Image (cartoon, rainbow, N blue to C red):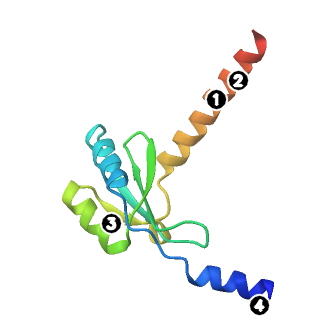
Amino acid sequence: MGLFERLRRRGRSRRTRPERNQDTEHLRLWAAQRHGVEGFLEPPTQVTETTIVFVAHDGEWTRRRIEGRDAAIRFTHRLGVPFYEVNKVGYPQRMRDYQRRQRVLRRREYRRGLER
């Protein structure tokens, strides 16, 4: 058995893990503590499983695994959260703005640490 055959075999046996109760519980609590939350489905890639990103009104966000598109639709519907697919609508601008603000704050904090 050659090297490449091992890699092929390993790739085939990979199974996606079902959503964990911890993941959905985290999303449920996160959405309950914020307002203006929307859900954005991210498709699976070679590296990651299907995930859903919850984005609040101010751009704060969190990401967790979910079983698939149908599970994401059911879950967001139960929570009363609007559902979108990243492939179709992209990420909201407020999420990018939030990331930019956080990056600036981290840099400032880092520089303050260097000055001490």
Disc 3 + disc 2, Cβ < 8 Å = no
Position above or below: 101 against 52: above
Bin the neighbour count of mark 1 within 10 Å (Cα to Cα): few under 14, some 14-19, many 20 and up. Answer: few
Q: Which residue position is annotated with label 2? A: 110
Q: Amino acid at mark 4?
A: Met
Could you tell me which secondary element the residue under label 1 belongs to? helix
Q: Which residue position is annotated with label 1? A: 106
Query: Closer to the N terminus: mark 3 or mark 4?
Result: 4
Quarter holding the C terminus is: top right
Would residue 100 appear left or right of 32 to someone viewing this image? right
Position above or below: 3 against 76: below
| Of the pair 4 and 79, the residue shown nearer to us | 4
Would residue 52 appear left or right of 109 to someone viewing this image? left
Q: Amino acid at mark 3?
A: Ala
Query: Closer to the N terminus: mark 1 or mark 3?
Result: 3
In the picture, the disc for residue 1 is 4
In the picture, the disc for residue 79 is none
